[in-house]
Image (cartoon, rainbow, N blue to C red):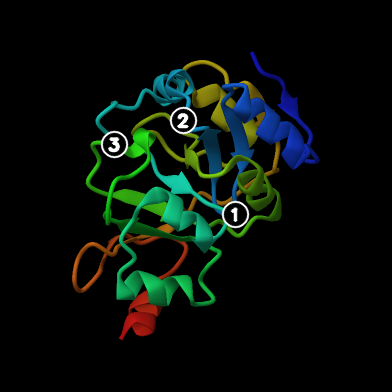
Amino acid sequence: MSRPESGDVAPEAIADCLRRGGIVLLPTDTVYGLAVLPSNPAAVERLFQLKRRARSRQLPVMIAAQDQLATLGVTVSEAARRVLRSPLVPGAITLVMGFAGAPPPWLAGREEVAIRIPDDARLLAVLRLTGPLFVTSANTHGAATPESLRDALAQLDGAPDLAVDGGTLNTVPSTLLNCRRDPPVVEREGAIATADLMALLR
């Protein structure tokens, strides 16, 4: 079983674990998340097993900055562009985008991808070191979102390779905005209210 680490784990240590094919449980700016390098199929498969998540359910992606969008081959609609340029980013808003061309191999076969730039300095530093990561909430499929590292570890079907303690977090996820739709549609209201988001997009 992985032992919980203190909250001061360096971004370099987290990135090193991920590069070696590890799974990291860490705090984000919203909830605890499980992170994995998407180009490592074995690590991705372990992540699905930890969450007891069906392989058909796609994993969201976190990036450090908008310039990493180009590496994903996504179509950035006008609505997505407005959100990305707003004070909501970085932050608790996830944007669903389609593809303009060929995506990287680890996104092959998908019609869309959910992307977020988190407002968390350590996680952003990790993302700058690793490039885009799959990051999904640290709960088993269908279970409540855990508030603490201990609760997250107890819920998972196995252990991550590194667990970073961020104290007690809220359990409200990011708001999910589907930018493939015209007009865009809020598919999950989370930390950002739908009314505030729609006011931005008017």
Query: Could you tell me if residue 76 is visible in this image?
Result: yes
Q: Secondary structure at mark 2?
A: loop
Q: CA distance from mark 2 to mark 3?
A: 11 Å
Residue name at image x 53 percent, y 34 percent:
34
In 3D space, how far apart are the residues under numbered discs 2 and 1 (Cα atoms)? 24 Å
Question: Image point 42% across, 26% down: which residue?
Answer: 51
Mark toward the start of the polypeptide (1 vs 3): 1
Q: Which residue is mark 2?
A: 39
In this rendering, which labeled residue sits more in front, label 1 or label 3? 3
State the quadrant of the C terminus. Answer: bottom left
Q: Is residue 153 left or right of residue 48?
A: right
Q: What residue does disc 3 label?
A: 108
Which percent across, then down, holds residue 70?
43, 56
Residue named by callout 1? 29
- Three-letter amino acid code of the residue under disc 1: Asp
Place of residue 42 in the rendered image (x, y in percent of width and height, measured from the top left): 45, 18
> SS for tag 1?
loop
Relative height, residue 98 to residue 7 (above, below): below
**Circle 2 Cα neighbour tier, 10 Å, few/some/many (<14 / 14–19 / ≥20):** some
From this viewpoint, which residue is outermost toward the front? 102
For the N terminus, the quadrant is: top right
When the figure is inspected, residue 5 is found, relative to residue 90, above or below; the finding is: above
